[in-house]
Amino acid sequence: MSLIKYIERLRRIDSLISMMATGTPEEFAEKLGIRRSTLFQSLQEMREMGVNIKYSCIRQSYYYADNRRIKIKLENTFP
């Protein structure tokens, strides 16, 4: 997978988690156009980066359990 696609996937995951609009793991994976196992791998990678992601069975959505998030910033360093 290219770096750009990976970054876009992380941004989409972040957006859906922030809105608590992920749905179940199956629905979340479908919204992202990936397999459930790929979703779990992406969530695990985010957790390894220090992001505290939890799942609520009541709300049927993933959510951030604290204020830590992943922030990706691309800068143009050319004059």
Image (tube, rainbow, N blue to C red):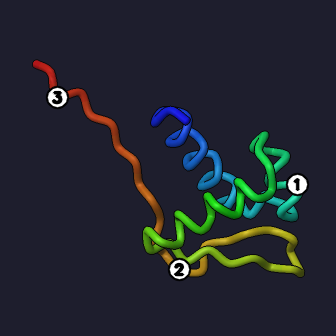
Kind of residue at disc 2: Asp
Q: Position of residue 40 (x, y in %)?
A: 70, 63
Label 3 with label 2: CB-CB less than 8 Å: no
Q: Give the class, few, some or many, for how many residues have Cα within 10 Å of label 3's Cα (few <14, many ≥20).
A: few
Residue at image position (68%, 78%) is 54
Write down the quadrant of residue 56 in the picture: bottom right
Residue bearing the label numbered 3: 77
Dot in front, 2 or 1: 1
Residue 66 is tagged as 2
At label 3, the amino acid type is Thr
Q: Which circle's residue, 3 or 2, is located before the other in the chain?
A: 2
* Dots 2, 1 in contact, CB < 8 A: no
Residue most toward the left?
79
Residue type at mark 1 is Glu
Q: Which mark, residue 18?
A: none
Question: Which residue sits at x=62%, y=64%?
Answer: 43
Tag 1's secondary structure?
A: helix
Classify residue 71 by image quadrant. bottom left
For the point 83% across and 63% down, the residue is: 25
Residue 45 as seen in the image, left or right of residue 26: left
Say what secondary structure mark 2 lies in: loop
- For marks 2 and 1 on the same chain, the one whose residue lies earlier in the sequence: 1
Left/right placement of residue 62 relative to residue 44 reads: right
Q: Position of residue 52 (x, y in %)?
A: 55, 77
At label 2, counting other C-alpha atoms closer than 10 Å, the crowd grade (few under 14, some 14-19, many 20 or more) is: few
- Asked whether the beta carbons under mark 3 and mark 1 sit within 8 Å of each other, the answer is no
Give the residue number, with chain letter if any, for mark 1: 27
Separation of residues labelled 3 and 2 (CA atoms): 32 Å
Where 10 falls versus 55 (above or below)? above
